[in-house]
């Protein structure tokens, strides 16, 4: 039985990348790929979402961590994997507080996303130790 995945990301390229990973895996099936954290909750009310790949920073009025908190309060069995390209160290703590199961940085891929998904569905909470360090400008 494949786990049903909801992808929530407002950027088309990451959403397509996540769709490709899900569609090429025997363990996962794509429920939907949407661009709004605000709409994520309504997909969960149908009862057939096992895992959400949730972007944190999105263009609608609800960010991914706010949506994750509401989903986890009402549907604690749904696993949520927060994904972001923003190296904000506060996101790690906020994600834990919201009940997010695992966390993955889009730009720093120490561990492949599919492995994080598998470990999350097995009940493990996978978080990086620290936010990535970003170099701005020309480093010498």
Image: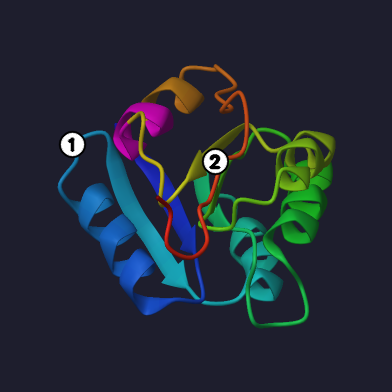
Spatial CA distance of label 2 from label 1 is 31 Å
Determine whether, in the image, residue 78 is placed left or right of residue 70: left
Where residue 104 is drawn, which disc sits there? none
* Magenta segment, prevailing SS (helix, strand or loop): helix
Within the magenta stretch, is there residue 114? yes
Structural crowding at the residue carrying mark 1, measured as other residues with C-alpha within 10 Å and reported as few (<14), some (14–19) or many (≥20): few
Badge 2 element: loop
Residue 2 appears anywhere in the view:
no
Query: Magenta segment, which residues?
Result: 112-117
Q: Is residue 50 above or below residue 34?
A: above
Q: Residue at x 59, y 64 (%)?
A: 43
Q: Is residue 30 left or right of residue 78?
A: left
- Location of residue 55 in the rendering, given as x and y in whole percent from the top left corner: 56, 59
Q: Position of residue 137 (x, y in %)?
A: 48, 65
Residue at the far bottom in the pictured view = 60
Label number found at residue 132: 2
Q: Is residue 119 left or right of residue 83?
A: left
Q: Is residue 38 visible?
A: yes
In the rendered view, tell whether residue 96 sits above or below residue 73. Answer: above
Q: Quickly name the residue at label 1.
A: 26
- Residue closest to the eye, 71 or 11: 11
Residue 60 figure quarter: bottom right
Nearer to us in this view, 64 or 133: 133
- Helix, strand or loop under label 1: loop
Identified at 50% across, 68% down, the residue is: 9
- Residue at 65% x, 69% y is 37
Figure quadrant of the N terminus = top left
Say which label, 2 or 1, has the lower sequence index: 1
Q: Nearer the viewer, mark 2 or mark 1?
A: 2
């Amino acid at each position: 039985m494949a786990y049903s995945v909801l992808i929530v990301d407002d950027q088309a390229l990451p959403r397509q990348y996540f769709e490709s990973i899900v569609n090429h895996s025997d363990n996962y099936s794509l429920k939907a790929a949407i661009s709004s954290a605000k709409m994520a909750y309504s997909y969960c009310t149908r009862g057939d979402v096992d895992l959400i790949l949730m972007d944190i920073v999105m263009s609608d009025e609800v960010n991914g961590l706010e949506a994750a908190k509401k989903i986890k309060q009402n549907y604690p069995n749904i696993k949520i994997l927060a994904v972001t390209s923003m190296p904000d160290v506060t996101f790690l703590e906020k994600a834990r507080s919201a009940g997010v199961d695992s966390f993955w940085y889009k730009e720093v891929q120490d561990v492949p996303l599919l492995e994080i998904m598998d470990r999350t569905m097995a009940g493990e909470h996978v978080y990086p130790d620290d936010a990535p360090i970003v170099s701005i400008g020309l480093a010498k």
